[in-house]
Image: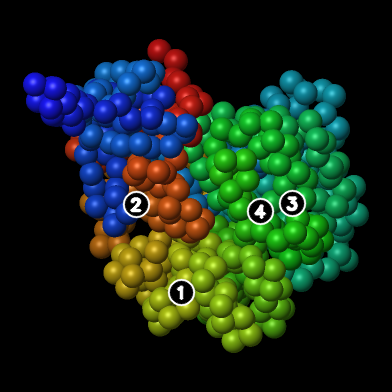
Amino acid sequence: MIRSLRFSLLALLVLAPVASAADLLVSNVNGYTLDSHGKLQHFQALLVDQGKVVATGTSADLIKRAGGAKVVDGHGKTLLPGLIDAHGHVLELGYARNSVDLSTTKSLDEALAKVKAYAAAHPDATWIRGGGWNQEIWKLGRFPTAQELDAVVSDRPVWLSRIDGHAAWANSAAIKLAGVGKTTRDPSGGRIERDAHGNPSGVFVDGAVDLVNAVVPALTQQDRIEALDTALAEMASVGLTGVSDAGIDLENYQLYRQYADAHKLTARIYAMIRDTGEAFDAISKDGPLIGYGNDFLTVRSVKLFADGALGSRGAAMLKPYSDDPHNSGLLFLPPAVMTSKIEKAFGKGYQVGIHAIGDHANREVLDSFAAAYKTHPDAVALRNRVEHAQIVSLQDIPRFVSLHLIASMQPTHATSDMNMAEDRIGHERIKGAYAWQRFLKQGTVIAAGSDFPVESPDPFYGLYSAVTREDHQGQPPGGWYPQQDLSLTEALRAFTLDAAYAEHAEKTLGTLEPGKWADFILIDHDVMKDPSSKIWNTKVLQTWVGGKQVYVARD
């Protein structure tokens, strides 16, 4: 009898559901995640403990395992892994939102009106700063001028960066303060736009921007704090749980450390040190910073620049621009200098990501990586990246495979540039531009981003552009060079698992597999099944990072 009772109790223990260690259950959701092989998985509930995923599965099964965990009812909403932007500029997003923001202006007159209104609302500001302008959107056919700015603000200097960050627009007061005149020579890697008499006309391209930046008042610590708070709030509101911050200085680094120590970061920051100069020397003294503050801050990468941008014709091309036959763009560094910078970063164990837009710049970058690998063969394992890889000669695309390079690309650049890109470079060169499928089919990892604030930080804009290659009005129907578009699963992978891979974080981020951080979002519709035309209009309802809610939409 006693023996029989023991067997009966043992059977009950075996058959009874065992509660998992868990502190959060998100149930009743329409959940999607990729697995480690990139295959799409569906689930109804997510079980979390101490910020990490315990399991995904049916609500019925996980309720049995949840024990005393807090239960959040997802009300049938779609749940996705948190999205990761592989190339953004965090503090610059905050600065843009906290100053004159011209990114939504459709005409020169509208932009001038915004500058005038901002100046009137900030009478104590010694400089009027901001940016986001794009003369292509304005259909101006030229760069704007200092005299046009003077008409709305002449009592103070005005300094406004172009949408791509590779040119800036000044009024006469700013030009005078900078001491730039007719006899001022164009600096290396830069160009001063001039009028018919050779005088500065108001726009400074690439390296020439530094001529005015030299007299712009330095940002204060309070400016940085306000910018970071603004940027983190906006990132959470659009479902970004992580970002590769493509180019920080020492002050940014110190601020990130302070926020990580105070548990104030609401997105995971993978920071890339801008260049290999003094900031790199200071930050890299003790080597890469990896997984600091529960994986909220990692600094193990360096950002270099090979050229400018397409919109300002600063992208370095192998042959002249189709719409400017006397201009081939601007190559920032001689090959030997680029190689030496890469080698310096490699020597300290840092990954290298290099901005390259034009086909000449991309070729120089590929050549420099090849040269640097000869002296640092083990650096292949650092998962080095080409940031943008925007226009690449067809003969150079396969070299990404042989050099083991990640293509860090921004889908919205294609739909923003399609109104002018082919005019700039012609029908043949466009075949190697925004060529996502060419890279993907050869096995190159694509890490997707936005380059915010150049583009919107909303990753659903990027997913939409990747899948449709159309603008938000559905133009052109069927997409611009649609043979290069991505499936939604491919695009989701580029914004999750492969963006994490580019950060050496695919074992902890990018999917909702057991043991990974519970970074996830709830959205307002089934993005995987609804028409692709709805993707860009997706509303994020909740954002969670490490099992903690960092954003909830207002009703």
- Image height of 112 relative to 380, above or below: above
Q: Amino acid at mark 2?
A: Arg
For marks 3 and 1 on the same chain, the one whose residue lies earlier in the sequence: 3
Q: Which mark is residue 249?
A: 3
Other residues around mark 4 within 10 Å, as few (<14) / some (14–19) / many (≥20): some
Disc 1 secondary structure class: loop
Disc 3 secondary structure class: loop
For marks 2 and 3 on the same chain, the one whose residue lies earlier in the sequence: 3
Q: Amino acid at mark 3?
A: Asp
Asked if disc 2 and disc 1 are in contact, CB closer than 8 Å, the reply is no
Residue 542 rendering spot, x and y as whole percentages? 41, 25
The residue identified by callout 1 is: 404
* Residue drawn at x 37%, y 75% as measured from the top left: 428
* Residue drawn at x 24%, y 24% as measured from the top left: 64
The residue identified by callout 4 is: 289
Residue 347 rendering spot, x and y as whole percentages? 69, 73
- Label 2, label 1: how many angstroms apart (C-alpha)? 19 Å
Residue at the far top in the pictured view: 555
* Residue drawn at x 50%, y 31% as measured from the top left: 236
